[in-house]
Image: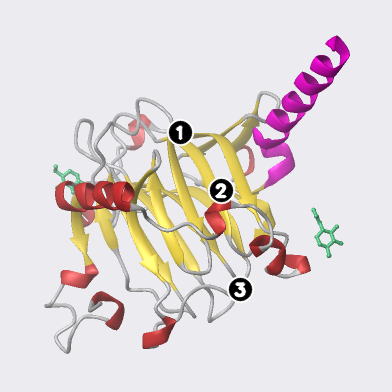
Amino acid sequence: MASILLHLTSSLLLVFVASAGNFYRDVDITWGNDRAKIVGNGQALKLSLDKASGSGFQSKSEYLFAKIDMQIKLVPGNSAGTVTTYYLSSQGPTHDEIDFEFLGNLSGDPYTLHTNVFTQGKGNREQQFHLWFDPTKDFHTYSILWNPQHVIFLVDGIPIRDFKNQERIGVPFPNNQAMRVYSSLWDAEDWATRGGLVKTDWTKAPFIASYQNFIADTCNWSSGTSSCSSSNKAWFRQELDSISLKRLRWVQKNYMIYNYCTDYKRFPGGVPPECRT
Ligand SMILES: *[C@@H]1O[C@H](CO)[C@@H](O)[C@H](O)[C@H]1NC(C)=O
Ligand SMILES: *[C@@H]1O[C@H](CO)[C@@H](O)[C@H](O)[C@H]1NC(C)=O
């Protein structure tokens, strides 16, 4: 009995360790030299930005459909002009891309969370939000749930955006190009904060964003997507239930500050087709 229990606990522990995320195992630092640092035993990663350069990393693996979680603590204090990106992208001129970008601000002024979805090389699907918490005080979980029918953006498990598969009305959906996770911290003082009116305060450099608990639950796409549909991965078929829909509407009503779907001036000939359904 005791040995069975011991066996059980040790295998549970293994599962936990295996899914806890290890930046040494899961990502490559691609930019910024020692401005990007994996710390501890690989549980944490820090990106920094100074006047000379920003920094960035990418996942070692590519994914075709996945549920990706990342916990991020954004640059605190006066972060005006800085941009922290966290996105999925494939390569080439007809690439797909699913973007989270965090635009910094003056101390006390809210960050802007900018989102976009590119399919077959075409984006122009921006939605922007303010957050209902201070994203610089603690780590918060930013997730992308990407399955054959939905791209759902979530913040602390609360859906903020649902890009649906609408191929039936001719809108391309990301479903045939594998994507990698990318993240970077860089300076965009020419446009990031209030359209470039507020510049970066370099006396506050280096600016630092912190990461932990990167977890990619994914399909083995080298053996075909059937490996996912035949598995018991709930996210592969997930869509928003009534409670999640209520939350999405709460965020969109109270925290959305820009939606391309209602920018009638930008699209005088009519908003894109996916906005009309
Ligand atoms: C910065 O704060 C101002 C004032 O509250 C706000 O209008 C703006 O959306 C915020 N974000 C950025 C990126 O400028
Ligand atoms: C993924 O599928 C390929 C091809 O079927 C197989 O060789 C490989 O071992 C699988 N990898 C995992 C992690 O299951």
Q: Spot the residue most to the front.
A: 1
Magenta span: chief secondary structure: helix
Q: Residue at x 66, y 23 (%)?
A: 40
What's under tag 3, amino acid-wise? Gln
**Does residue 247 show up?**
yes
Q: Of circles 1 and 3, which is in front?
A: 3
Q: Residue at x 27, y 32 (%)?
A: 133
- Residue hosting label 3: 177
In the rendered view, tell whether residue 133 sits above or below residue 248: above
Q: Which residues are magenta?
A: 1-27
**Does residue 194 show up?**
no
**Residue 101's x, y, as percent?**
38, 52
Label whose residue precedes the other's in the sequence (3 or 2): 2
In the rendered view, tell whether residue 79 sits above or below residue 245: above
What's under tag 2, amino acid-wise? Gly
- Residue hosting label 2: 56
Whether tag 1 and tag 2 are in contact, CB under 8 A, the answer is no
Quadrant in the picture for residue 1: top right
Alpha carbon distance from label 1 to label 2: 12 Å
- Residue hosting label 1: 208
Sort mark 1 into few (<14), some (14-19) or many (20+) by Cα contacts within 10 Å.
Answer: many
Quadrant in the picture for residue 180: bottom right
**Residue 269's x, y, as percent?**
17, 89
What's under tag 1, amino acid-wise? Ile
Q: Residue at x 46, y 39 (%)?
A: 50
Sort mark 3 into few (<14), some (14-19) or many (20+) by Cα contacts within 10 Å.
Answer: some
Residue 218, labelled with which disc? none
Q: Secondary structure at mark 3?
A: loop
